[in-house]
């Protein structure tokens, strides 16, 4: 076991385990936030595993997860808008903490990767991961001000 695999194990065991527990239990507002954060934690773990096992295919899985995870959260936000309107979820601390984790993981992996296509793929994955989860969290907490609903 190397340091990359150990870091991925810590992210998966600590973060994803806690968010999966949040998805399985509790009120609706906690479940939708936990679903969003599960994606945001699983993606950096996949990037770390790709480096640890030297498997570039895991980066492709992380890229797809970074793209589709926030989209799934936005679908939940739209379908559950009536139920969430009375008591909207707010988890900005957790959202920014997970975004910071994603930023650190992508920055470190870009530093150790050779310049080229692999680095570009890491940067795209990081941008989708961080931007998508911040937008999805904002949509869950009541949307964007000035946007008409209907």
Image: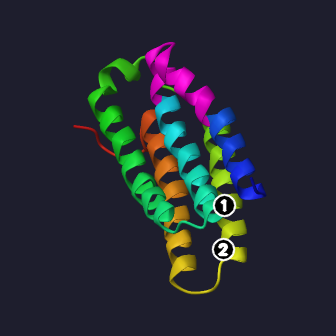
Q: Residue at x 56, y 53 (%)?
A: 46
Magenta-drawn stretch, dominant element (helix, strand or loop): helix
Q: Residue at x 61, y 41 (%)?
A: 95
Q: Which residue is mark 1?
A: 52
Foreground residue, 53 or 90? 53
Figure quadrant of residue 73: top left
- Note whether 134 is above or below 80 in the view shown: below
Q: Residue furthest right?
A: 3
Q: Which residues are magenta?
A: 16-32
Q: Quadrant of residue 41?
A: top right
* Dot 2: element: helix
Horizontal placement of 42 versus 109: left or right? left
Q: Secondary structure at mark 1?
A: helix
Tag of residue 41:
none
Q: Which residue is mark 2?
A: 110
Q: Measuring from the top left, give residue 1's x and y in whole percent.
A: 74, 52
Q: CA distance from mark 2 to mark 1?
A: 14 Å
Residue furthest bottom in the image: 116
As rendered, which of 139 and 127 lies closer to the eye? 127
State the image coordinates of residue 139 (x, y, percent, origin top left).
42, 40
- According to the image, what is the colour scheme of the structure? rainbow
Give whichever of discs 2 and 1 has the lower sequence position.
1
Residue placed furthest toward the front: 1
Q: Does the CB distance between marks 2 and 1 fall below 8 Å?
A: no
Q: Quadrant of the C terminus?
A: top left
Q: x%, y% of residue 32?
A: 45, 28
Task: Tell whether position 4 is magenta.
Answer: no
Label 1 environment density (alpha carbons within 10 Å; few <14, some 14–19, many ≥20):
some
Q: Is residue 86 visible?
A: yes
Residue at figure coordinates x 69%, y 33% from the top left: 14
């Amino acid at each position: 076991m190397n340091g990359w695999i150990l870091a991925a194990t810590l992210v998966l065991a600590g973060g994803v385990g806690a968010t999966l527990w949040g998805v399985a239990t509790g009120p609706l507002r906690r479940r939708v936030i936990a679903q969003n954060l599960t994606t945001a934690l699983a993606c950096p773990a996949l990037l770390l595993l790709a480096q640890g096992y030297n498997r570039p295919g895991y980066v492709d899985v992380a890229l797809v997860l970074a793209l589709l995870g926030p989209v799934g959260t936005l679908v939940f936000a739209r379908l559950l808008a009536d139920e969430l309107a009375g008591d909207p979820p707010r988890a900005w601390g957790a959202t920014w903490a997970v975004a910071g984790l994603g930023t650190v993981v992508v920055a470190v992996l870009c530093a150790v990767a050779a310049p080229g296509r692999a680095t570009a793929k890491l940067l795209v994955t990081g941008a989708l991961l961080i931007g998508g989860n911040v937008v999805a969290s904002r949509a869950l907490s009541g949307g964007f001000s000035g946007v008409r609903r209907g």
